[in-house]
Amino acid sequence: MSPKLRRTILAWLVLSPLVVTTLFPYAVMLITALKPATEVLTPSWVPSRLAWENFVEMWEATGFGRALANSLYVSFLSTVIAILVAVPFAYALDRYRFTGRGWLRHFLLVTQMLSPIVLVIGLFRLAAALGLVDSVNSVVLVYGAFNIAFTVWMLQSYFATIPRDLEEAAWLEGASRTGALLRVFLPLALPAITVTAIFSFINAWNEFVIALTMLRRQESYTLPIQIFSQVAGRYTVEWHHVMAASLAATVPVAIVFSWLQRYLVRGLGLGAVK
């Protein structure tokens, strides 16, 4: 057995408890979602048959389609807002030197340490004063505002790796600063902007506390709130529908996050070095 193979086997043995712990909730969701309704509460890992119809029934019983549309709307628009604000913000933060620049970077980092639940009462009172309670647009604005600091920090780290010489060469060729930004800088930064936008989208997709506070009518619920409403305050819970909805809402996001997490780590590492 080669040393590389031994190290690989040892690494997987060490990581196996973490892998099992991480995948166990998904296994429970999948098995419960595929059980017939009469077997949901039976202590058995193997159902008598695979009830794939649970996913079809869940779509109507839980209002999954409407909540899915709301989540897509909220997550997409809040991501667009965050990116539109963060790109020029991060560019200025990296390319220009001004008084308080270091303090501003530290402020962005500190804001990531605040949980939304700390600010939720103030946000609710502000939304009530503006008449935005029970409106998905209020959630869009709050999510966009919360994601700006994260996107600026990520993009500034990536922008710092793009050589200034490329923009200076464009200036020498007669391009304006705006022209160099649009034709030279942004095409190079597009992969970083795309990855950061996906992370911002995932953050908005998974958020629960703010949506639970702001939204009142079931027609405006996002997916996390809609699934929660199928359990909270109910005398009878259709667990096979709840698990099917949870699986459909979380697995695609988990796959995308697992695929992109290496880019997040690299971006944070570049920011630390800079």
Image: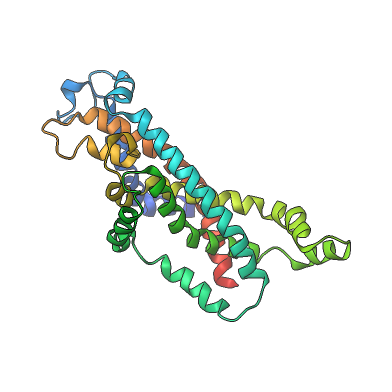
- Residue 240 visible? The answer is yes
Task: Depth check: give the residue in front, 120 or 40.
Answer: 120
Residue found at the far right of this picture: 173
Residue 92 vertical position relative to residue 224 in the rendered view, above or below: below
Question: Given the current orientation, which residue lies at the most extreme bottom position?
Answer: 99
Front one among 119 and 206: 119
Residue 45 visible in image: no
Name the one closer to the observer, 136 or 51. 136
The residue lying toward the viewer, choosing from 259 and 207, is 207
Which residue is pictured at 88% across the width and 61% down the height?
173
What residue is drawn where x is 32% and y is 41%?
A: 224
Q: How is the image coloured?
A: rainbow
Where is residue 25 drawn, in percent x and y?
29, 41
From the viewer's perspective, tell me whether residue 126 is left or right of residue 100. Answer: left
The quarter of the picture where residue 114 lies is bottom left
Q: Residue at x 65, y 77 (%)?
A: 97
Q: Would residue 260 appear left or right of 215 to someone viewing this image?
A: right
Q: Position of residue 181 (x, y in %)?
A: 73, 59
Quarter of the image holding residue 220? Answer: top left
Number of numbered discs on residues: 0
Q: Position of residue 70 (x, y in %)?
A: 40, 37
The C terminus is located in which quarter? bottom right
Question: Relative to 24, does residue 38 appear above or below in the rendering?
Answer: above
Image: 272 above or below 170: below
Question: Which residue is most to the left?
Answer: 235
Q: Position of residue 91 (x, y in %)?
A: 64, 64
